[in-house]
Image: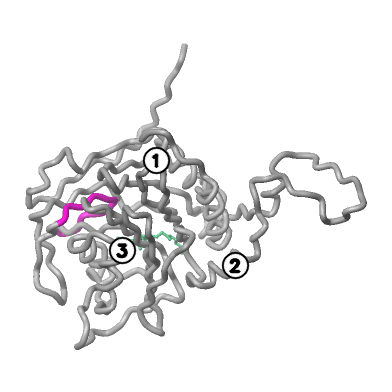
């Protein structure tokens, strides 16, 4: 399971995700500079044009991005969508993009959600594996830009669906319209202390603070995380500067993180939040934390030579540094 959000703070927009899984693939931060050439399976080769940064594994010198953002302030995250997801055979009328190419394809050419929406009308997500070893995985995508707009893209048996996203978060199943419908079941959840309406005549002692969130789901499942993160994001205060904004951002994502041991997926195997990341879409600064190291690490897109044609890899810093005070 995974969770992705876009958060507005202090005039800036932060976009990224939690990656929840039982094993790590060796993913790490990767910059694709403007002159790197993407080789597409069913389209002509094309230069990246817009530089991008995100978490990826690199296979055969190809960056398989889990999530990334480009220098124009457009971000995309791929999340698991097992069940409803369906990819299609090659189509003669459309641009045939494989699901693992979707992030490079969109980030290399487009600067906004509106541009992406137009482009997607012409896209067929074609069922072609990266390799025998790396088969396609069922994904759906949260796409957001620095104006704060976001959409969800889902390819199912009924076709490619693009939904405006009024709550600016995404988890996993069910399909996005079902997640929105489910929010109605939690419509009265509030940061405010409730009034006693259950037995109005009785003097009921509101024994705790926070009773307005008593029915907020806290499970590791995707429907629970959707409601919880939508609520937390919607009520998160803005930061007053970059540091407090990114701190708030990670608190939102960490409110739905999965601690080890709580989500069993097989004998002795547990899904947990491997990393959380977020890019400031205005400045192109990429931040991340991970399970082992919850210090915030940052990489600035603008500090590299973005006109290069070679991928730039960064080590994932996984060592916890405890600040002993005595
Ligand atoms: C599994 C992850 C989602 C996390 C999640 O939701 N886990 C719940 C599991 S469960 O549903 O709870 O059981 C997703 C998110 C991004 C994906 C990579 C995207 C690039 C590339 C695309 C290729 O086509 C296939 C290989 C590839 C490396 C992908 C592997 C894997 O699919 C990644 C890591």
Dot placed on the residue nearer the N-terminal end, 1 or 2? 1
Mark 2 burial class by Cα count in 10 Å: few <14, some 14-19, many 20+:
some
Q: Secondary structure at mark 3?
A: helix
- Image coordinates of residue 237 in percent, x first then y, are 50, 41
Q: Position of residue 201 (x, y in %)?
A: 92, 52
Q: Which residue is mark 1?
A: 10
Which quarter of the figure has residue 92?
bottom left
Q: Main secondary structure of the magenta part?
A: strand
Which residue is under mark 3? 113
Highlighted magenta segment, given as a residue range: 50-60
Q: Secondary structure at mark 2?
A: helix
Gap in angstroms between the C-alphas marked 1 and 3: 21 Å
Disc 1, disc 3: CB below 8 Å? no
Q: Quadrant of residue 240?
A: top left
Residue at image coords 38%, 76%: 161
| Residue at the image position 43 percent from the left and 54 percent from the top | 5
Nearer-N-terminus badge (1/3):
1
Quarter of the image where ligand 1 sits: bottom left
């Amino acid at each position: 399971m995974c969770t992705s959000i876009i958060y507005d703070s202090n005039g800036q927009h932060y976009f990224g995700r939690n990656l929840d899984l039982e094993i790590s693939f060796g993913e790490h931060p990767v910059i694709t500079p403007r002159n790197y050439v993407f080789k597409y399976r069913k389209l002509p080769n094309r230069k990246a044009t817009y530089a991008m940064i995100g978490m990826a594994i690199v296979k055969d010198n190809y960056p398989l991005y889990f999530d990334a953002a480009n220098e124009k302030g457009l971000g995309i995250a791929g999340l698991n969508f097992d069940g409803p997801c369906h990819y299609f055979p090659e189509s003669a009328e459309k641009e045939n993009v494989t699901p693992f190419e979707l992030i490079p394809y969109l980030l290399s050419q487009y600067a906004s959600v509106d541009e992406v929406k137009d482009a997607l009308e012409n896209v067929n997500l074609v069922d072609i594996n990266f390799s025998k070893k790396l088969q396609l995985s069922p994904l759906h995508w949260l796409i957001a830009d620095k104006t704060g707009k976001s959409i969800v893209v889902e390819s199912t048996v009924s076709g490619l669906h693009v939904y405006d996203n009024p709550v600016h978060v995404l988890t996993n199943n069910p399909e996005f319209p079902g997640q929105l419908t489910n929010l109605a079941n939690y419509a009265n959840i509030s940061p405010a202390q409730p009034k006693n309406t259950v037995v109005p005549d009785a003097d009921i002692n509101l024994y705790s603070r926070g009773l307005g969130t008593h029915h907020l789901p806290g499970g590791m499942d995707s429907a629970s995380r959707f409601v919880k993160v939508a609520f937390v994001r919607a009520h998160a205060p803005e930061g007053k500067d970059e540091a407090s904004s990114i701190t708030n951002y990670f608190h939102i994502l960490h409110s739905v993180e999965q601690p080890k041991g709580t989500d069993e997926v097989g004998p002795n195997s547990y899904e947990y939040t491997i990393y959380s990341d977020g890019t400031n879409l205005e400045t192109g600064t990429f931040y991340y934390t991970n399970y082992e190291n919850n210090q915030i690490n940052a990489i600035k897109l603008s500090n590299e030579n973005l006109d290069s044609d070679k991928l730039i890899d960064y080590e994932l810093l996984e060592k916890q540094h405890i600040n002993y005070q005595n």
